[in-house]
Image (spheres, rainbow, N blue to C red):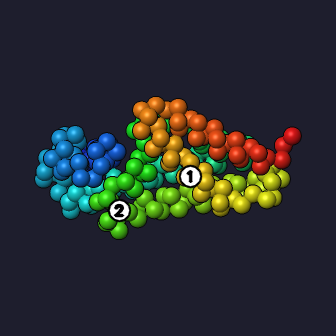
């Protein structure tokens, strides 16, 4: 019997494989094997690999936004919330599960697959800008700080930190990048 549990296993298996292997390296057979599902089950729930990949990418993007919002919507100053976001536990050496998709030419060439990736980064920059703007409005951060520019910088540093860490096979470059951007933001703090 085909159940929604099978659909969930297929989506979760695809998410894992996309993160590990990318789109081209994620075959329907590998998805089915990891999910413990047959070909008929896969095609009962999804029209094919692109449809299943889209569901997996959307799920990954939603999860990333949810985890980020836990810190952004939490207590504390703007700088404390951004620090909590940047320092939360991550699998740094595997890279960002959404950011890595930008390096996948097949994902970027398909407007449907690219859309949730772009939407996630637009959301992230926007949400960071909101938190920073709150900090400026509350007098926590300098009025000279441009929240949109600073938000783009934070996202770029975070994604670049993943790249540097993967290249070095060490979390140290990621941690240095986070420390650096937090130092730049702290320099904009009005707290004495």
Residue at the right extreme of this rendering: 192
- The answer to which of 62 and 137 lies nearer the viewer is 137
Residue pictured at 51% horizontal, 58% vertical: 121
Relative image position of residue 126 (x, y in whole percent): 60, 60
Is residue 98 or residue 61 the one in the foreground? 98
Quarter of the picture containing the C terminus is top right
Q: In this view, does 180 lie to the left or right of 40?
A: right
Question: Can you tell which mark lies on residue 165?
Answer: none
Q: How crowded is mark 1: few (under 14 residues within 10 Å), some or many (20 or more)?
A: some
Which of the 4 quarters of the picture holds residue 130?
bottom right
**SS at badge 2:** helix
What residue occupies the far front of the structure in this picture? 168
Distance from disc 1 to disc 2, alpha carbons, whole Å, reads 19 Å
Looking at the image, can residue 12 be seen?
no
Q: Residue at x 51, y 42 (%)?
A: 161
Q: Can residue 15 be seen in this view?
A: yes
Please tell me whether residue 127 is drawn above or below residue 80 in the rendered image.
below
Number of marks in the rendered image: 2
| Residue 170 position within the rendered picture, expressed as x and y whole percent measured from the top left | 46, 31
* Disc 1, SS: helix
Return the residue at label 1. 155
Work out whether mark 1 precedes mark 2 in sequence or the reverse, and give the earlier one: 2
Q: Do the residues labelled 1 and 2 touch (CB within 8 Å)?
A: no
Image-based side of 128 in relation to 17, left or right: right
x and y, in percent, of residue 39 in the image? 13, 51
Location of mark 2 (residue):
108
Please tell me which residue is depicted at 70% across the width and 54% down the height of the picture. 132
């Amino acid at each position: 019997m085909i159940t929604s549990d099978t659909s969930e296993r297929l989506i979760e298996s695809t998410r894992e494989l996309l993160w590990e292997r990318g789109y081209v390296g994620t075959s329907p057979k590998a998805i089915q094997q990891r999910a413990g599902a047959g070909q008929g089950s896969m095609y009962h729930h999804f029209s094919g690999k692109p449809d299943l990949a889209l569901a997996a990418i959307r799920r990954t993007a939603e999860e990333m936004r949810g985890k980020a919002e836990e810190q952004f919507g939490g207590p504390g100053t703007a700088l404390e919330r951004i620090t909590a976001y940047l320092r939360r536990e991550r699998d740094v050496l595997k890279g960002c599960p959404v950011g890595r998709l930008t390096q996948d030419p097949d994902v970027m060439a398909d407007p449907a697959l690219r859309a949730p990736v772009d939407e996630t980064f637009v959301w992230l920059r926007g949400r960071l800008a909101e938190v920073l703007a709150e900090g400026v409005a509350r007098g926590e951060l300098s009025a000279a700080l441009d929240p949109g520019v600073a938000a783009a910088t934070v996202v770029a540093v975070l994604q670049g930190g993943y790249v540097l860490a993967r290249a070095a096979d060490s979390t140290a470059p990621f941690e240095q990048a986070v420390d650096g951007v937090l130092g730049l933001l702290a320099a904009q703090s009005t707290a004495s």
